[in-house]
Image (cartoon, rainbow, N blue to C red):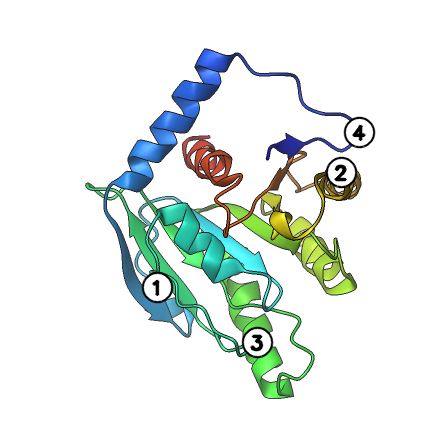
Amino acid sequence: MTSFAGDSEEVPEDPKARAYRLETARRIFAGPVEFLLSAPKLEFLPEPKVAEIAFAGRSNVGKSSLLNALTGRAGIARTSNTPGRTQELNVFDVGEPLAFRLIDMPGYGYAEAPKDVVRDWKALVFDYLRGRAALKRVLLLIDARHGIKPVDAEIMGLLDKAAVSYQIVLTKGDKIKPTALAGTARAVGEVARTHPAAYPHVLTTSAEKGEGIPELRAAVVAAVTA
């Protein structure tokens, strides 16, 4: 799997440069990756001394599975069959010495979530997006089978308003045919190009098959070092 621009595929990369980029990212994630803490409020987060990459997405988009695949560690991010269960910011340290942090944000868009849970989620996420100086990029996960839903579009608008750089990552790419996946990626990319804070390239992944994971690792490292 690869990445797609909004109106055309990106210019082919030199094979040697691509291999170096992917291997560099692989080596970083092959090093220490550890769960640090869960923060129900911003004051519980560690001091913003290193770059942070946040993962956002609808409930059951496959965020925990993708984080497990990204880090190469089964179970580092706990999966749940109960949508909307995670309501805290989960923090993971990457590298030794510490290179950057991954922030697993609470899933959004669960229709049956109590109103007070939704309110608390919005307050936590809004505060984090607006006030976290260490935040380098948000990776916005979208289910490849469904594309951008209204609640996703709402989050994209929020990220634009907060002027937070974000990149769309399609999950569960193995659940649809390759031609359909490519079409969804291009359609989503076209939407992304209309949003000022969105990175123009869409990544396609499958946590189950491991497809697109090397590119995702490289995208994280590129965002950290940008």
Asked whether the residues under the numbered discs 1 and 4 touch, taking CB atoms below 8 Å apart as contact, a structural biologist would say no
Tell me whether the residue at label 2 lies in contact with that at label 1, contact meaning CB atoms closer than 8 angstroms.
no
Q: What kind of element bears circle 3?
A: loop
Give the CA separation, mark 2 to mark 1. 42 Å
Q: Going from the N terminus, do you reach mark 3 or mark 1 first? A: 1
**Identity, as a three-letter code, of the amino acid under mark 4:** Asp
Locate the N terminus by quadrant: top right
Q: Residue at x 28, y 40 (%)?
A: 30
- Along the line of sight, which residue is nearer the eye, 59 or 193? 59
Sequence-wise, which precedes: disc 1 or disc 4? 4
Relative side of 221 to 116, left or right: left
Q: Spatial distance from mark 2 to mark 4, Cα to Cα? A: 16 Å
Within 10 Å of disc 4 (Cα), the crowding (few <14, some 14-19, many 20+) is few
Give the amino acid at mark 1: Leu
Q: Report, in whole angstroms, how far the alpha carbon at label 3 lies from the one at label 1.
A: 24 Å
Tell me the residue that label 1 is attached to: 45
Residue at x 49% of width, y 39% of height:
216
Visible in this render: residue 162? no
Q: Position of residue 12 (x, y in %)?
A: 62, 16
- Residue behind mark 4: 7
Q: Residues within 10 Å of mark 3 (few under 14, many from 20)?
A: some
Q: Give the mark, 3 or 2, whose residue is nearer the N terminus.
A: 3
Q: Quadrant of residue 74?
A: bottom left
Vertical order, 10 against 135 (above or below): above
Residue 7 left/right relative to 22: right
First in sequence, mark 4 or 3: give its number: 4
Q: Gap between marks 1 and 4, in whole Å?
A: 39 Å
Image coords of residue 96 (percent x, y): 20, 42
Residue flagged by tag 2: what amino acid is it?
A: Thr
